[in-house]
Amino acid sequence: MNKILFCLLFILTCSACAPSAEILATPNALDQTDIASTWTPTTVPSVTNLPTYTTTNTPMVTNTVTLPPSPTPTDPPTHIPTPQPIYVVLRGEVNVEHVSCFYGPHKSYLYKYGLVGGSNLEIIGRMVDTNYIQVRAIGGDNPCWMNLEWMNVRGEIENVQPIDPLDTDIPSSPYYFNAPTGVNVTRDGNQVTLNWNAYSLRAGDGSEQFPYLLEAWVCREGRLIFTPMGSWINSLTIEDQPGCREPSHARLYAVEKHGYTPYIEVPWPTNLN
């Protein structure tokens, strides 16, 4: 009997000391649902006082070209090229049996050589005021002046270059170096009369043409007209009208068979009409 009681007490005591079966089944952790419901996430601290970077737009370095100011409508043009006329060399045929050709653009100049009728020539210049043309052999280099009346021109003569009288190349005398002297000028209305001292030449130096040449620019119908005149004596009269803005003027040569003496400027009288 005592043994039976002792055994029962021993069994009870051991049962009180043993762990429960539920705890042994999950010995290390709580249920996952409990873990999820009881975990509180740690708040990530906010980042403060971070340095602030400001972007600065740095201008690009460029080469600056300064342009000239644009002209206003009132500004005068700086340079406008003057259109240059285009002239031509024409050809023509001498229409009479014989023509005299001179050193200058009028029969008052020294004779240079003769032209035969039917000759074909180049026309390289013209003198508007005297109606003379400058001609030469085709491809030649020895021009002379003849009256336009004696030439059949192929083409328009207005397209040939006009020649300034001051550009006329007349031969200078190789022996006489003095200009005429003693020029005296008088006016009677539109008539201007010149007188000068006779020019002395050696025997044989006479040209058998006019021994004196006057190149005059006189007023006719409101404009200056180039008017060459030859004289057999040391006096001549020329018409000079009023009405020109430019003053009339003239120059006088003595002539010998080799060429012209230096000229003297004529003291031209004022036209008061």
Image: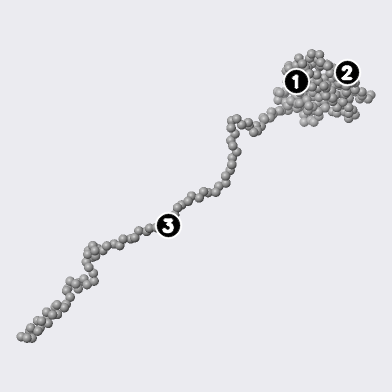
Task: Please name the residue shown 40% across and 58% down the image.
Answer: 50
Which of the two marks, 3 or 1, is nearer to us in this view? 3
Taking 1 as reference, is 162 above or below it?
Answer: above
In this view, the residue farthest toward the right is 203
Name which residue type carries label 1.
Answer: Leu
- Residue linked to disc 2: 233
Q: Residue furthest bottom?
A: 2
Left or right: 68, with 88 as reference point:
left
Which residue is farthest left?
Answer: 1
Q: Nearer the observer, disc 1 or disc 2?
A: 1
Q: Is 230 or 47 nearer to us in this picture?
A: 47
Q: Residue at x 10, y 83 (%)?
A: 7
Q: CA distance from mark 3 to mark 1?
A: 95 Å
Residue at numbered disc 1:
224
Q: Is residue 142 visible?
A: yes
Q: Quadrant of residue 260?
A: top right
Q: Which residue is mark 3?
A: 51
Disc 2 to disc 3, how far (Cα)? 116 Å
Residue type beneath disc 2:
Ile
Kindly identify the residue that appears in the image at 21 percent across and 71 percent down. Answer: 26
On the image, the x and y values in percent for residue 221 come to 73, 16
Q: Position of residue 14 (x, y in %)?
A: 14, 80
The amino acid beneath tag 3 is: Pro
Residue that appears at 73% across and 17% down: 243
